[in-house]
Amino acid sequence: MLPLELKDVCFAVNGRNIIDCVSVQIGAGPRTIILGANGAGKSVLMRLCHGLLQPTAGEIKWRGGNGNRRSRQAMVFQRPVMLRRSALANVVYGLKLAGFAAGECDLRARDVLEAVGLERQADRPARILSGGEQQRLALARAWALGPEVLFLDEPTANLDPGAARDVESIIAAIHATGTKIIMTTHNLGQARRLGDEILFLSQGRLVERAPVERFFRAPAAAEAAAFIKDELPWQ
């Protein structure tokens, strides 16, 4: 499916650009982290890429033609929505919607629940799981689909450190299977641990793109340097 190409993409609300003329091409392989201060437009840009929002100007293309190719994508949000059914049934339902054969759904769902450490919670109602368990279930639900691209919108923002580490381990495992990770985070340590390249947004504009180590060692954009200094004042 990749590369994903954004060409002069804007997204405006009430005449104000939330995303301001962003042009970038994102290829398969490296984990892409979208960084920026609160209100920079990170989540909006992710939703535009996934096709949940449509740009008010510009163009978003996937390789092979126009369109969002949603069938080969998945997305996990800060606060996942759990269906009123068991953890296992949450995963199975997603697989059925995606057109997987009935006989394959249960097997695939159980395998992925085991991979995220939720095999013992398979028959428990999803909505009574802890926040960390629900996020792991959301990742399992996405992973089961075998997406080429997985969008993650601050997936550990509401979790305690232990639960966040569990989620990070799962994200690394998903990447290791060949799925492209595109993720927003406000956590610079997490960006370093999970990212290969950084896209830095400031007031809706893409002001820097760099490999993760170079970004943190010597950011080229003044906005990026100021952001790092504010978040890591000892540097």
Image (tube, rainbow, N blue to C red):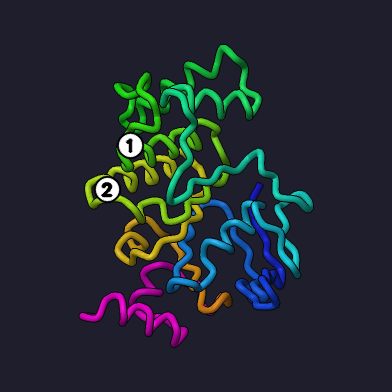
- Residue 57 x %, y %: 75, 70
The x and y percentages for residue 11 are: 67, 69
Task: Provide the residue span drawn in magenta.
Answer: 207-235
Q: Is residue 164 above or below residue 185?
A: above
- The crowd level at tag 1 (other Cα within 10 Å; few <14, some 14-19, many 20+) is many
Residue drawn at the location 52% of the way across and 23% of the way down: 92
The spot of residue 38 in percent (x, y) is 44, 71
Q: Which residue is mark 2?
A: 165
Upstream in the sequence, badge 1 or badge 2?
1
Callout 1 touching callout 2 (CB < 8 Å):
no
Binning the other alpha carbons within 10 Å of mark 2 as few (below 14), some (14 to 19) or many (20 upward) gives some
Looking at the image, residue 50 sits to the left or right of residue 84; the answer is right
Q: Is residue 231 magenta?
A: yes
Q: Is residue 18 left or right of residue 119?
A: right
Most foreground residue, 120 or 180: 120
Question: Quick check: 18 above or below 92?
Answer: below
**Residue at point 29% right, 21% down?**
120
Residue at 39% across, 45% down: 171
Tag 1 secondary structure: helix
Give the residue at the far right of this rendering: 65
Q: Left or right: 110 with respect to 21?
A: left
Residue linked to disc 1: 133
Q: Residue 5 falls in which quadrant of the image?
A: bottom right
Which amino acid lies under the numbered mark 1 shown in the image of this protein?
A: Glu
